[in-house]
Amino acid sequence: MTIDSGESASGMQEQPEGPLLSVKDLVKHYPIERKGFLGARRGTIKAVDGVSFDLHRGETLGLVGETGCGKSTIARTLMRLEEPTGGAAYFKGRDLFTLSKASVQALRREIQMVFQDPFASLNPRMEVGQIVAEPWVVHPGIVPKEEQGAKVSALLERVGLQPTDARRYPHEFSGGQRQRIGIARALALQPELIICDEPVSALDVSVQAQVINLLAELQADLGLSYIFIAHDLAVVRQISDRVAVMHLGRIVEVGDEEEIYVRPTHPYTQALLSAVPVPNPVGRKERKRIVLEGELPSPVDPPSGCTFRTRCWKAEPVCSQDRPQLIDRFDHGHPSACHFAELQASPAAGIA
């Protein structure tokens, strides 16, 4: 997408070169108190523990991992719905975490979010037209009031709904239709970046494909950038240009979609991919399922060194002593955080 020079609606200086978003060593910890035999003990949930990644204009970065690995916490922190414990996030060159409250409000014209549960994220007492137009109430002056009705109709049509749906309420729609309403609301401010937090996990498989196709069409037409969060690797592959695999608050592998799914190098990624259902009977027979054994680690008391070592079949003493860094060990643009990463993964790890 071509971006004019000058300042954006949020007052940020436009940066035509470099990543649209650059996250550096993001940390989000939650203090807790645990009651035990000897009384209360203070602890910390390390929801996000040093995450770094870049997102380029017009690109989709998929964040994938098991429930509780920190994916949604990253989304909420980038939106400043949660305050970070440490790190920085630069959107078009300016650190999101140092912005004033007023600047954060303005920033949300450029970064929008689509939530996991479309029913919970829509006000049941508001008509759909009011929901879609609500961003213009929060950010007055973008669309004149007399033009909002036509704009709402155009947005509803753009996401595959009817203009007459503006007079209906969220409970009158299916889950997929409600998610389309959420997408229309996100588009109202013409953002550059949309963070999609598990946007299809609550939908039927056939409806998932429709919503993903819609997001892809909108990206092609409007030049949008996405952070697409999901726990389903098959879903992530359909829409992502690059994929970052998370485990216990950290990114353990990141690379182009083809590299991650055909040549995964981290044992955790290989195990996740081995669990993805394969429709081809021949492929099912040829692929070996990797069953993880050992202790399931906790974000309150994560293992030393590599957090995956308690369940990894490659673990050696060095894994408990040194935390592996996310580096490109093979000089092929596909970094992983494993002391024993393999360039050529087993055929069992890929998705045919």
Image (spheres, rainbow, N blue to C red):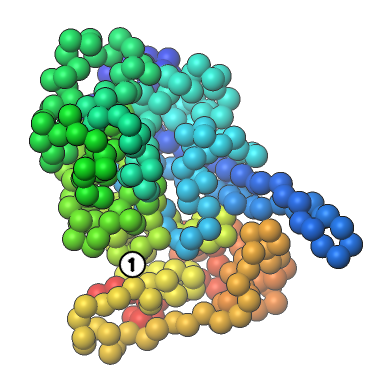
Quadrant of the image for the N terminus? top left
Quadrant of the image for the C terminus? bottom left
> Is residue 325 or residue 220 the one in the foreground?
220
Asked if residue 28 lies left or right of residue 193, the reply is right
The residue pinned by badge 1 equals: 261
**In terms of image quadrants, where is residue 156?**
top left
- Please state which amino acid type lies under the numbered disc 1: Tyr
**In terms of image quadrants, where is residue 320?**
bottom right
Spot occupied by residue 235 in the image (x, y as percentages of width and height): 29, 60
Would residue 204 be seen by someone viewing this image from the given angle? yes
Secondary structure of the residue carrying numbered label 1:
helix
The residue under the point 21% across, 86% down is 281
Residue furthest to the bottom: 285
The residue under the point 65% across, 39% down is 85
**In terms of image quadrants, where is residue 11?**
top left
The residue under the point 20% across, 17% down is 148
122 in relation to 13, above or below: below
Spot occupied by residue 55 in the image (x, y as percentages of width and height): 39, 41
